[in-house]
Image (spheres, coloured by chain):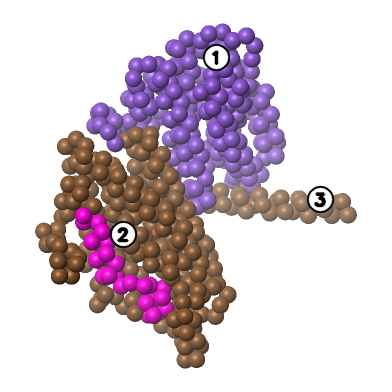
Amino acid sequence: MYSQGLIGAKTETTEDEAFLAAFQARIDAEEKIEPNDPMPEGYRRTLIRQIGQHAHSEIVGMLPEGNWITRAPSLRRKAALLAKVQDEGGHGLYLYSAAETLGVSREEMTEELLSGKAKYSSIFNYPTLTWADIGAIGWLVDGAAIMNQIPLCRCSYGPYARAMIRVCKEESFHQRQGYEIMMTLARGTPEQKEMAQDALNRWWWPSLMMFGPHDADSQHGDQSMKWKIKRFTNDELRQKFVDATVPQGEFIGLTFPDPDLKWNEEKGGYDFGAIDWDEFWRVVKGHGPMNRERIAARQKAWDDGAWVREAALAHAEKRKARRAAAKMAAE
Amino acid sequence: MAAAAAVSGEALTAFLLRLADDHLIIGHRLSEWCGHAPMLEEDLAMPNMALDLIGQARTLYQYAGEVEGKGRDEDQIAYVRRERDYVNCLMAERENGDFAHTMLRQLHFAAFMQPLWQGMLSSRDERLAGIAAKAEKEVAYHIRHAGEWVVRLGDGTEESTRRMKAAVEALAPYVDELFESDAVTKAMAEAGIAPDPATLRPAFDAIVGPIFAEAGLAWVETQHGQTGGRQGRHGEALGFLLAELQHMQRTYPGMIW
Ligand SMILES: [Fe+2]
Ligand SMILES: [Fe+2]
Ligand SMILES: [Fe+2]
């Protein structure tokens, strides 16, 4: 789903002034950069890092939601959740393909994920404890993803922008579906309403963290904005998300876990309380409640699947050899 | 199908429940893989098949609920029965094991279902004929997908061949049960509703045989086939599957989700 503010990309670049100026002129003219076009190394690296993080987030994001597929409360919800998690896998696949156009392989990216070198959206390091978490993730996490990704549909790098157009349509469907789960719970029995409120309480702050550090503390934002990889700052996107989401929650009678949350007529948006950045960095650095389990699950799938991938390759080789032998024999 | 005999609602309900349970349980098993597959492509393909199977289960449960006439909806039937009331075949409930087991289980089930759906295309029960028309296309894909994997793994590496052979051994005892006939299946056949499973073995062999041949796998004949699923006598693993499946409906009875 979910690129968050990019963590730790190196945007510096060593090309000469004329090359960089010509590249910037293309960007400023809103031309799309395509895989074979000349581009600064910093641009390529930033995109590989960002698209890779985004792809990994889709894949790791399958785990917390997949946790409820076998326990979904009705056949309709089970099918919808299965379809959603499958969509996320599809997003991962398009995104890995988009990153591959920049000269990195899916296998290399996977190894970086498993070694901890590559990051993924920290929100998936929280556990899904109840069915309502599935509603909350769709509503809030896919909702935050959309805020991030709609501007990415206009990203200067063509393959990423095109992947985002496909992905965004599905993410907004996920968001509506998640909200509908929350609405059903909020209008259900007291137990269901309590479940929905508890999920909101746990997922609200991590959702706000998805947009990444404050602009003042974000090291790489400026260059990404200049290259039109990003179109809005982390804080701008976070504000849009809060403004869109708070009325939705209030409409279904839920309360946001933030005593400082209130409408500010002057700015035409909500004011909200301070985000716990210590928690954010703790989780990014691997110490959230589920970091170890998430990577262990991906590692296990990768290791357990090794013999299958090897067999597929070996079989393809055997077929090729047999075809070649048959052709020789026929000649 | 010759002269049609009338069929009791009870027999039709029993038949529909068997089919529905088969699809729900094997679909549930496949869905357990979601996010843990050997490669991303399979993280898309397995849920895809699971979605087909759960979709088929839903239409079958809905129809069963109507025929039964006790006002039970799909979820009440799917979620709030006791373990002994589930009448799926044992093949469907077998645990996933490794990827070779899962793919072979799917191939076996699909190769059983394809001729059954094909026979139901001309069912005198129009509702079932309609369900069969959709399902028959889906099951063809399941055979292709699972069959390709059985070939790749059977004729892949030493390890994959060993694992594929182990899967053939492990699942062999559950094949014959698929083709059992009893009063219910005979009533369906006589009424022109569905072919008797006992008549479908040649079609199954015609699907699985060439795939095994291409994979270099030998068919394992078993003298000791396991049976009991249609009477609700299951393996020990089913109870755990049902515990997960039923968790929400049992913990929060009667709510709308
Ligand atoms: Fe995304
Ligand atoms: Fe996604
Ligand atoms: Fe999504």
Q: Indicate the chain on which mark 2 is placed.
A: A
Amino acid at the residue labelled 3: Ala
CB of mark 3 near ligand 2 (< 8 Å): no
Give the residue drawn at x 43%, y 65%: A153
User: Along the polypeptide, which appears first: circle 2 or circle 3?
Assistant: 2
Corner quadrant of residue A172: bottom left
Q: Look at the image and tell me in which quarter the N terminus of chain B lies.
A: top right
Vertical placement of residue A239 versus A220, above or below: above
Q: Classify mark 2: helix, strand or loop.
A: helix
Vertical placement of residue B167 versus B87, above or below: below
Boundaries of the magenta span: A223-247
Mark 2–mark 3 Cα distance, whole angstroms, equals: 56 Å
Mark 1–mark 2 Cα distance, whole angstroms, equals: 53 Å
Does mark 2 fall on the same chain as mark 1?
no
Chain colored brown: A
What residue is shown with label 3? A326
* Marking on residue B188: 1
Q: Look at the image and tell me in which quarter the C terminus of chain B lies.
A: top left
Query: Is A247 displayed left or right of B63 in the figure?
Result: left
Q: Nearer the viewer, residue B130 or B44?
A: B130
Q: Nearer the viewer, residue B124 or A118?
A: B124
Query: Is A306 displayed left or right of B74 in the figure?
Result: right
Q: Residue furthest right?
A: A331
Other-residue count near label 1 (Cα within 10 Å), few / some / many at <14 / 14–19 / ≥20: many
Residue B19 counted in the magenta span: no
Q: Classify mark 3: helix, strand or loop.
A: helix
Q: Indicate the chain on which mark 3 is placed.
A: A
Q: Position of residue B61 (x, y in %)?
A: 42, 25
Give the residue drawn at x 30%, y 44%: A180
* Marking on residue A144: 2
Other-residue count near label 2 (Cα within 10 Å), few / some / many at <14 / 14–19 / ≥20: many
